Structure formats: C-alpha cells, structure tokens
Image (tube, rainbow, N blue to C red):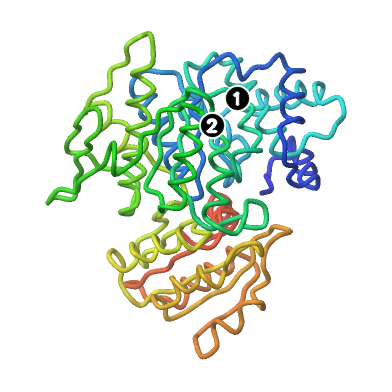
Amino acid sequence: MTDMTPHFSHLFQRQRLGIRPGLEGITRLLAHLGDPQQYFPVIHVAGTNGKGSVASLIAAILQAAGLRTGLYTSPHLVHFSERFQINGATPDNQSLNDLVTRIEAADREQNATFFEFTTAMAFLHFARSRVDMAVMETGMGGRWDATTACHPALCVITGIGMDHKEFLGDTLAAIASEKAGIIKPGIPVIAGSLAPEALDVITRQAENCKAPLFVMGQNFCTEKTRDSRYIYTGKTIFKDLHPGLEGEHQADNMAIAIAAVETITSLMTTPVLLDETILHKALTARKWPARLQTLATSPLILLDGAHNPQAAEALAAYLRQKTSEPRTLVFGVLEDKDAVSILHHLTPLFSKFILTRPQNSRSLHPSALADIFQGKHSETLLDAPEALARAISITPANGTICIAGSLYLAGEILRGMNEGILPF
C-alpha cells in the first residue's frame, strides 16, 4: 500500500523484493540494531481473520490497565505511521525518519524486504520508547513471518481460514501449520474458535512445545444477554460487556483479547488490575478503521476490509441483520484472492454493483468478474473514490452502500475522504 508522504516513498520500492520465507534476513538485521526485540515482552498475534481487531483490542485493554503499550499492525490504510502505535499515538515524521535512517545503516546488504524493514522499525521504535509491552500482528503467515523473530510472552491465533493459499497451502491443516509456527516452547497460546482439522494441528504443536493452550469454547467464551451485551467467562467472569466494534464476530474477537490479557497479566511479576471498569473503558471506546466502519448515514455507507470468504460471510451476516435495501456494492479485490467465493456470500444481498480496482500491482481487473454479474446492474469505474461517488448517486437515502474486497481499497476511500474528494 502506497503512502502519500514523500519522506517514506522510497521504502515502498522494497516491495519489489516480494515475500522471502525465512527468518535469516530479519534476524541478521535485528542483530545489527542490537536486538531491540529483546527489550520488552511481546504478545504475538496470528490468524487468517480477526488478528488486526484482536491485536487492537488487546492493546486497548493493556493501555486502559495502565501499561505503555506498543501496537504493530499492517497494512496501513492512509498514513505509513499507522503501523507503529504507542498508546494509540503514531510517531511523527521526524521520528520515522530517524528510524528509517538507523535501519538503512544497519541493512548493510540493502536487501531487507519491505515487511522485514517495517518490522525492524517497530521493534526499534518500541525499544526506544520503553514500552511496557508490545502487541505484534503477523503479516501473512507465522512460521516464517518477520515478526516471529521475537521471543513472545504470549501467542494468539485468532482463527484459520482459506487465504494466501499460494504461500501457505491449500488445506486448513497446511495453513494451520504455518500459523502454528509462532508457538514457542513453554509459551502460553490463546486460540479462537477453530475447525477440527486446524485445531488438531495447533494442539499438536502446542503439545510438542509443552505450551499451555487455551481454546475459545473450551477454556473461555462469551454469552450474549437479552440486551445485546455480553458475559465473558474465563479465569474471571466479566459482565455487561460490549465489543465496541460492529458485528457479531467481534464478540469472539473480544473474548480472545480478554483471554489474552487475563493470561499475560497473570504471568507478570507486578500485579496489573483487570476489572470490568477497565474493560468497559477499553472496549466501548475502541475504533478500528475499515471494520464495518460507518462513513455516512443517508444513505448508510459501510466500509469493510473483507477480502476472503470467511470475512465476507461475517459481513453478509451483519448486512442481513442491520441494513436496509436497496443495497449497492462497491467492490475491488486483489488477484490472489478468491473473488468468486467472496462474491458468493455478498451478491445475493445487493441489487447494484460498482466494480473498481485498488491501486496495487496485484489488483484484479473488474473485467475478470464480468461473468459473475451477467444479468445484474453493474458498472465499472477504476478510480475508487469515483466508484463510491457513483454508488452514492444511484442509491436512495434510505438504502445501503457497502465498500468491500480489500484493505487497499478501503485505504483509498479513506484517503479520498481526508483529501475532500468524496462528497461527505
């Protein structure tokens, strides 16, 4: 994903190096930096879906509990600095320039990939800022992900679905094996609700590593109350909770986040209070862009980064329950995604379709989707803000517009809003 800030545009040229499996490059780079990843405890979060939301919720709870908390996520949506947060604040350009200069000097062979480089930036930024704890979201996988260069205090695997099959494998078990690569000897693992074949893999890896495993539905869970609040049951029972983020699936993400914080705080030598007041403060106020984000209300405009079938299914469930017809879908996707399966979940809910293309070298041209929309009202506008503007013009005020298919597309929409290109 590109960034509009010229100071860092040269970093994105490293994306041409692609994805390089293995930890040798990041390990060597971190060693040249003095191994900053060793100066603070890490909660390491992997998963196909939900890992960004879970990482964000964990960081919010830790911050509300009084800990200076780092949060590393990807990709960014609008500004490059979004990847590196401390207590919700992003570094300024001068701080980022200092980090880039230091890491470029340490990258003696000048061959660190973009993700290796940004991961090293996160570790160095958090070490320099003396965080009490950092939450690190993996990029694509786990076993060979650059973030795995840390030695975590806790591992979290949110959920496992079919995505990145060309890199991670074409079965749930194969993908689970890659995600399970974050598990370290003796380090506790929190797992979300997993299909049996995925859970078997995670369980075996945890047993091999003698790592305590806590699974949603077995060791902790949430229960919905009559007023749509939730009761969390784990080591402690917390009542009257609400995820803050929209969608029924966020209740599962909330449960995983609370279980993670419960576990990590029980291991800390200095007691950290975790009670309902802290959880209410953290959860109800937490916002996470492009996760069922409301952009406008007349018509209702929802922005969601759903980019695989599992995420599309969750989005479709929300649309059925919470939104009104007629609905217009603005859709753009990368070519390595299962666009047909994504649209299988979404198209029955929409009467009009605006197809667009994220500004990314891996984006899929809408012409490849033409057969899916035969007999339906569909248009193509390759510029994402123009596509949304067109959707607004053909959707009545009591209807719904949903933008989905890619976080890269979501970022372009948010940038269009920031720059005043869009009419709201």
207, 214: nearer the viewer: 207
| Residue lying farthest to the bottom in this orientation | 375
Question: Looking at numbered disc 1 in the image, what kind of residue is underneath it?
Answer: Cys
The image shows residue 77 at horizontal and vertical percentages of 57, 47
Task: Give the mark nearer the N terminus: 1 vs 2.
Answer: 2
Q: Image quarter for residue 298?
A: bottom left
In the image, residue 177 lies at what x, y percent?
Answer: 56, 45
* Label pair 1/2, CB-CB below 8 angstroms: yes
* Nearest to the observer: residue 30 or residue 21: 21
Q: Residue at x 57, y 80 (%)?
A: 379
What numbered label is drawn on residue 16?
none
- Residue lying farthest to the top in this orientation: 270
Compared with 308, 254 (above or below) is above
At x 14%, y 48%, the residue is 225
SS for tag 2? strand
Q: What residue is rendered at 67% in x and 52% in y?
A: 167
Which residue has dot 2 on it?
A: 136
Give the residue at mark 1.
Answer: 150
The 10 Å Cα crowd at callout 1, few under 14, some 14 to 19, many 20 or more, is many
Q: Position of residue 86 (x, y in %)?
A: 50, 25
Mark 2, other Cα within 10 Å: few <14 / some 14–19 / many ≥20: many
Q: Is residue 420 visible?
A: no
Question: What amino acid type is highlighted by mark number 2?
Answer: Met
Instruction: Residue 29: give x, y in percent of width and height.
Output: 76, 24
Q: Quadrant of residue 104?
A: top right
